[in-house]
Image (cartoon, helix red, strand yellow):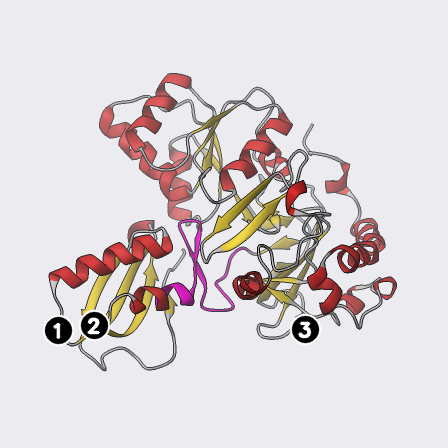
Amino acid sequence: MSFYDSLETRSPEEREAWLMARLPQQVAHAKRRSPYFRRLLAEHAADSVTSRAALSTLPLTRKSDLMELQRAAPPFGGLTATSLADLARVFASPGPIYDPQGRGPDWWRFARVLFAAGFRAGDLVHNTFSYHFTPAGFMIESAAQKLGCPVFPAGVGQTDMQVQAIADLKPVAYVGTPSFLRIILERADELGADVSSLSKAVVSGEALPATLRKLFNDRGVVVRQAYATADVGVIAYETASEEGLVVEEDVLLEIVRPGTGDPVAEGEVGEVVVTGFNPDYPLIRFATGDLSAVLPGASPCGRSNVRLKGWLGRADQTTKVKGMFVHPSQVAAIVARHTEIGRARLVVDNAGDQDRMILRCEVATPSDDLRAGVVISIREVTKLRGEVAFHAPGDLVNDGKVIEDLRKYP
């Protein structure tokens, strides 16, 4: 079978009618069970939200506001429709932002993504996403189990042990960030280990440059991308056509003008806004902060849903590095630990196709001890490694920018 289910090949008209029939029910459910949405949507009648035009009149809920909302009403800001006692797990993403997981199989809807990448029952999956704090490891685990795939829960780091496990167990599939897959393959070469069993992969959390995809293809590993978040789950995924990312069937997607809730014309770059149909976490018009655009036409793979062009940057200064969000407030927290620092700017680039963070700090009297302390603070606050560069007071551009993303993708 070429498709996960018949939903993928419905006519666009049939899909739209299905989504619009479910939409008022989900809005009503959110208002009934979620204190936050009850307040936010008090002026809007659920039974009137039966079209995209009506949906566009509802206020946005921004991912960048979740930290403040959750501090005011812990643990989830009143956004969930299921009590804490009835959830399966609770996770913490950087910020921190706390994310719920409800009960039931494949709660984040990742099985469709793995299937599109060629994962089939019996395939051993080497899962290098973290099982610690964040939900990515469990996203893959539950989806693989639904497909009948056994999983090796590798998690992050310990490259030599990862290489040995692949050489011994011969998994056919990898899941994780593309940069870590490259590290594993290169380390295997250094160790003389045979990891040629890997033939397919799903990667997420970072961009996949064309140069890196070619490197994997030359090694016999066919790689597909997934676009997902800890709160929404899967939003879109790549198929064999490798032409954009097909939107997941259980997602109602909008592209809006950044800073507003107004939908843009097809093909215009804007912010990705998602309405989901998850009963536990009924996110209505959830603004992800990611920029993308809808590709015109149908996918050559035969799936009929709309396609996203891919990740085109951030609508705000929050950025994602090696699968982890980094927020301006975290930069402020690092600076607050070191009174010697005046202004600071976190610069992210991808020299050598690897994400890199450099915290540029204005300091009157630099020292090696200060540099070492700031490096430790970056690690503790963001859970990522970063470099430090010192500048004289007044050297940094005074444009209000705290995080600058200079990554380029061929």
Q: Is residue 155 left or right of residue 91?
A: left
Q: Earlier in the sequence, mark 1 or mark 2?
A: 2
Residue type marked 1:
Thr
Q: Residues within 10 Å of mark 1 (few under 14, many from 20)?
A: few
Q: Is residue 55 left or right of residue 195?
A: right
Quadrant placement of the N terminus: top right
Q: Quadrant of residue 185?
A: top left
Residue 26, percent from left and from top: 78, 54
Farthest residue toward the right? 47
Residue 325 drawn in magenta = yes
Residue wearing tag 2: 340
Residue type marked 3:
Asp
Quadrant placement of the C terminus: bottom left
In front of the other: 132 or 278: 132
Residue 365, numbered label = 1
In front of the other: 280 or 349: 280
Q: Is residue 71 left or right of residue 16?
A: left
Write the start and end of the magenta stretch as one range: 310-331
**Looking at the image, is mark 1 or mark 3 nearer the viewer?**
1
Looking at the rendered structure, the secondary structure element under dot 1 is loop
Residue type marked 2:
Glu
Looking at the rendered structure, the secondary structure element under dot 2 is loop
In front of the other: 146 or 74: 74
Inter-mark Cα distance, 1 to 2:
8 Å
Residue wearing tag 3: 262
Inter-mark Cα distance, 3 to 2:
43 Å
